[in-house]
Amino acid sequence: MNVTSFRTEILGVADAVAREKGIDREEVLQAMEMAIQKASRARFGFDRDIRTHIDRKTGEIQMAAYREVVEVVELEGSQISLKDAKLRNPEIQVGEFVTDELPPFDFGRVAAQTAKQVIFQKVRDAERMRQYEEFKNRMGELVSGSVKRVEFGNVMVDIGRTEAILMRDQLIPRESFRPGDRIRAYIMDVRPEARGSQIFLSRTHPQFLVKLFAQEVPEIYDGHIEIKSAARDPGSRAKMAVYCGDRSMDPVGACVGMRGSRVQAVVAELQGEKIDIIPWSENPAVFVVNAMIPAEVAKVVLDEDTGRVEVIVPDDQLSLAIGRRGQNVRLASELTNFGIDIVSESQESERRNKEVNEKSDLFVRALDVDNVIAHLLISEGFGEVEEIAMVDIDDLAVIEGFDADLAQELQNRAKLFIAEQTKERAAQIKKHKVKSDLETFVGLTFDQVIALAEKNVKSLDDFADLAGDELVEYLPDLTLDRANALIMKAREHWFESENEQSSDSND
């Protein structure tokens, strides 16, 4: 290829490639400049610093060899001594460059092929970057395409000017596709990789369900109805919470549609997946009750500190509340973002009776009273001896059957019991050599502290060093979530110390 002929066609070629590949013309011209530069170095020497420029208006190619001005020449091809450089320009300084224009030349077959490969590679890179920039902003959208091929269960989807991949584990169970089939999916992730941008699709993601409803229900698309959350067991069952600020509009009815037309269109796309559409509520307890549909709920006990909810259901609703293989309670938990524990009314009654008996036994033993007085105290809401010791004497005296003298006697006995218990605990702490930081750690009872000390966990650092399952083994009454939360709380002083050291070093 002659340089003159190359120059007359170069701008036309750049425009054609840019249009065909959908990339910027400037990127194509930069790739051409790099290709010419590489071919020029092969012609004039790889040790030379050759730079090329294509005029954006005329297509004229300019090539020049650059040599840096140095005191002592180490690289002959790309450096020149200050002494020789001053012969050409007396005012030149070290660090500046001397340029020599290079004449046009015939690239030759090998050099032309090399230049062609460089151009193709740079154009491919630019095309991949364009795809990434385009689709990274489309994450979370629904996309339609046709199946191009299926490889080891993974579906390659043609979505226009590029190709996306639907991994086997992102397919709804039991569904299969063949080349040419039309398919809809959710753009889950876009990542730039060595082979080009990888666009990952999903048909199992909860947001796929949300986007399908947005297409079928105009009120969702327009923003009148909001989908607050969604949870799926792909191909089997799903739950979706909807909300509408307009009280005159029924968000559940709008999503179901006339005779179920709207929800059935989504169910058909999801291979028969059953969908429970429930009203969202800002009241967590009400939201949990709604999420347990189709089971009926008798009572809800919410612990916001641990993020768990205890749901009490009638005995005949227990299996329905749990669902097959725990499906119903698991989806309800994902939907509400609460850990949900299901308890039947008989189990709850049995547990409540056990707690009452334990409190009654404590009061009988600590206050030296009979069961009647103990149950009277419990019925008034007292659960700990400390509460009786600290309460106003008038609040005790007003209990039916009590008077001021009895109230004062009970409080005196409570204080005496606490004093004896404190003395005994101090002896236990001393015996087991428990450090004060663990003894006073909020979240552990005294009995739990002693149980840990017997396992050689005697300081807050010892406790913070435990793993969650290890703590549950030492204290079986703790759940794994609660154990992990306590351990993370115990580790807070580590992070505080690190921050203080970092602050001191910065000062």
Image (cartoon, rainbow, N blue to C red):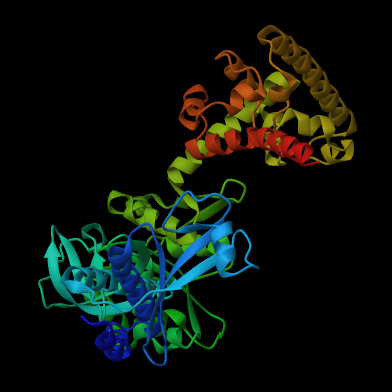
Q: Is residue 131 above or below residue 151?
A: below
Q: Is residue 2 above or below residue 471?
A: below
In percent of width and height, residue 336 lies at: 48, 60
Rendered-image quadrant of the C terminus: top right
Horizontal arrangement in the rendering, residue 293 relative to residue 475 (left or right): left
In percent of width and height, residue 262 lies at: 31, 84
> Which residue is located at x 57 percent, y 82 percent?
245
Q: Is residue 157 visible?
A: yes
> Which residue is located at x 88 percent, y 35 percent?
393
Outermost residue toward the front in this view: 87
> Which residue is located at x 32 percent, y 69 percent?
40
Outermost residue toward the top in this view: 431
Q: Is residue 376 visible?
A: no
Q: Is residue 44 above or below residue 161?
A: above
Residue 203, by quadrant, is: bottom left
Rendered-image quadrant of the N terminus: bottom left
Residue 492, by quadrant, is: top right
Q: How many marks?
A: 0
Residue 156, by quadrant, is: bottom left
In percent of width and height, residue 293 lies at: 39, 64
Q: Nearer the viewer, residue 244 or 380?
A: 244
Horizontal arrangement in the rendering, residue 10 relative to residue 214 (left or right): left
Q: Nearer the viewer, residue 327 or 133?
A: 133
In percent of width and height, residue 94 lies at: 61, 58
Q: Nearer the viewer, residue 94 or 477?
A: 94
